[in-house]
Image (spheres, coloured by chain):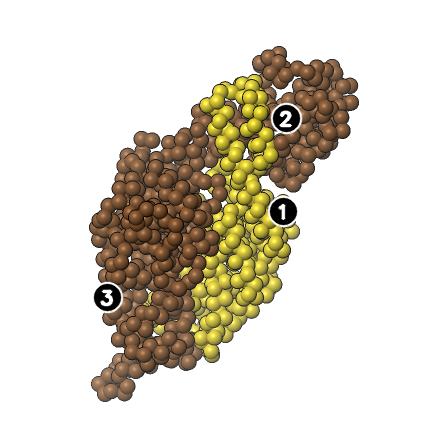
Amino acid sequence: MSRLQVVSGKGGTGKTTVAAALALALATEGRRTLLVEVEGRQGIAQLFETEAFPYEERKIAVAPGGGEVYALAIDAERALLDYLQMFYKLGGAGRALKKLGAIDFATTIAPGVRDVLLTGKACEAVRRKNKQGAYAYDYVVMDAPPTGRITRFLNVNDEVAGLAKIGPIHNQAQAVMRVLKSPETAVHLVTLLEEMPVQETVDGIAELRGAELPVGKVIVNMVRPHVLDEAAVRAVTGDRRKEVARTLTRAGVSGSAKLVTPLLEQAAEHAERVELEREQRAVLGTLGLTTHELPLIGEGMDLAGLYRLASELRKLGVGE
Amino acid sequence: MTLDAAGTLAIDPLLDDAGTRIIVCCGSGGVGKTTTAAALGVRAAERGRKVVVLTIDPARRLAQSMGIDSLDNTPRRVKDVEGDGELHAMMLDMKRTFDEIVEAHADPERAKAILTNPFYQSLSAGFAGTQEYMAMEKLGQLRARDEWDLIVVDTPPSRSALDFLDAPKRLGSFLDGKFIKLLMAPAKMGGRAGMKFLNVGMSMMTGTLGKLLGGPFLHDVQTFVAAMDTMFGGFRTRADATYRLLQAPGTAFLVVAAPERDALREAAYFVERLAADDMPLAGLVLNRVHGSAAARLSAERALAAAESLEETPEETPDTADHPTRSPAANAAEMPAENLDERGIVDQEAGKADGRGAGVPSPEAAKTAKAVETAEVAPEAAAVAEAPGPSEAAATGGTTGATGTAEDPEDEDPEGTAGAAEPANHALTGADSVSADDSVERLTAGLLRLHAERMQVLAREQRTRARFAALHPEVKVAEVAALPGDVHDLAGLRTIGDRLAAGGSPAGAA
């Protein structure tokens, strides 16, 4: 299992939730995982129902079985200042640069610098070792930008290495790229069984492969159970409608047309969706990747739901 | 709903009002912004307006449906739009938009120097804020052409909600800032006397930056900045003009969301931010809202009824003896308390079961129960002969036996197959009901679906109520969920109809 797990997905597919569940699932007995977010949305804090994180790694959860999950919201500006201090002892110069607007320039406008800082910090956490020489974190899980931007985001170091042809930034960009393109990294894409997210997943995987970035798994999120298939719906809408009405009455609810008609309409919609989902599953099947399916948490996502997804992931073999 | 104090957002009056010149659709990713923008465009055009829709990153088939799948950065007329109006649509090409600005505002030689600069090439290909900036730039251009009486804009799927409002300002303040002046200093000042002091600071800075970035990169940046020098004023002016355009009375912001916690949280943030920036908010478009025409039947009752129907293996001994009796006759004879009791006992298991197979416990519990019942039933021998419950128990299927009981011709080998099939479904994770199942199982399926729908409804209502409590002043147009994706004009018209209807789908209020 790769030590840097990057989780991307189209907006609305629940990639932050899946990333958090993955971090919990990987934190099996005695292991530590670090969950990082890079888009400044404080989505992890909201998910774990805690206040916004400062720029530091802090423990946010104990996983079932005793592992620990740490979280970090990477801030590009802070990462840059840290960097200047760490490598060039430029603490004071950093403040001066900030005053001039140079830090702002570097982190918001200069092409790619922001992304380099974010991926660079994540890679630093992957490679970090403690005094005993063991890795500080067994896994680092990144809640990454959405599918449409992920390749550019991860590949930006290549671009920067091309722009800054010499110097420490160049070297740093290359070092980060070595981690990201190695089997130490896996990029997972979260999708729903709907046409647009699936299409974006297919396109995203082609882009990742084109950039030689290691594609991990497809995670289908919010999968709803199939209760009735199309054939069943056809059967009940035909001659057996009366039987259904009688059976409803027998089960203690009204068998009147006022109830039967909407129930059958709902069933027809369900059947249509099942059919669409079947098509989308087939499309995902052509990708030749491991696909994990996670159930829809009917009550809405909360901490309990998150732990449930983590246990589903463990059942699927994540963390072994 | 009492919390919906501001009421329903009426879309048609907004579209019909000649004073509405720009509609901006904003919201977090994956809530259907682009589809909403396209549907509004189609509807406005078919109601007689001359409309252009600017989309940022449409799904391929949606783009195809409007004939804009080729990226040429120019509005194209959409065919097959009915009525007197016109619909034009375009997809933003940010690099091209940037290039066009450079070409329009610099002499050919300078333009060439900029376009070939490596720093420019990276910047224009879409880093931090470029897409947002270019979307606003394009909006300004379209408005300036004055060829359309309504412009509908989709916004980029930004990392933070209102990047498209901030990006122009940010670029503007950067271009006006000290840093850029410092970067430009060497090119401008050369070795002029009297500027020595500044030059000392400067050389220390470029020294640091040069160390970090490498000399050639810094050189690229400096060349770029020098070449762009004459254009900076223009950028700033246009960014300001576009920003003011967004605040003008002819502009209407629609915040688009889905009835989910995260999307509505973002929506609330949008609403607050728009108010802080004096941007005119028309209302909230809530996509994919679920309703039910059978909302009077609660999830709990539907589940309990489904449970009672799925318990029918217990009937098997009875009906196997009298295969000609109708289920209704059985029902009449079935003691009422017995039914109720089962409903209550199994409710918990049923809930878990409804969310997908692969959760072994409820299945096992029910199967165990079926076996137990079969054993204690007086006609146990008959059950053993008819391959129903015991087979089903072995394979994990629960109600296969019902089919055996009800249809006399199913009694033997087919009965086994019938029992095995649901078991297979259970194994593959899709606990699906097929056409050849019994009416009990089908009806139970209908009830389970309804229960699932009612749970979704309840959850959506809770999230909406939370938003309404925070922002009771915001008008809302709800769009009932469609079972599939939209990728043709007919689909966009349907969305438009639902948008215009605006109110809650049946049962959702």
Q: Which residue is mark 3?
A: B237
Could you say where residue B100 lies in the image, as x and y percent from the top left?
33, 69
Q: Nearer the viewer, residue B193 or B98?
A: B98
Tint applied to chain A in the drawing: yellow
Q: Nearer the viewer, residue A202 or B377?
A: A202
> CB under 8 Å between callouts 1 and 2?
no
Residue A69 in view here: no
Could you say where residue B308 lies in the image, as x and y percent from the top left?
59, 22
User: Residue at left 71%, top 33%?
Assistant: B420
Q: CA distance from mark 1 to mark 2?
A: 33 Å
Q: Secondary structure at mark 3?
A: helix
Residue A146 relative to residue B499: left or right: right
For discs 3 and 1, the disc positioned in front in the rendered view: 3
Tint applied to chain B in the drawing: brown
The crowd level at tag 1 (other Cα within 10 Å; few <14, some 14-19, many 20+) is some
Residue A264 relative to residue B377: left or right: left
Q: Which residue is mark 1?
A: A316
> CB under 8 Å between callouts 3 and 2?
no
Q: Which residue is mark 2?
A: B438
Q: Secondary structure at mark 2?
A: loop
Residue A206 relative to residue B25: left or right: right
Q: Quadrant of the N terminus of chain A?
A: bottom right
Q: Secondary structure at mark 1?
A: loop
Q: Nearer the viewer, residue B326 or B447?
A: B326
**Above or below: residue B338 compared with residue A106:** above
Amino acid carrying mark 1 in the image: Leu
User: Residue at left 55%, top 61%?
Assistant: A206
Chain where mark 3 sits: B
User: Residue at left 50%, top 71%?
Assistant: A158
Chain where mark 2 sits: B
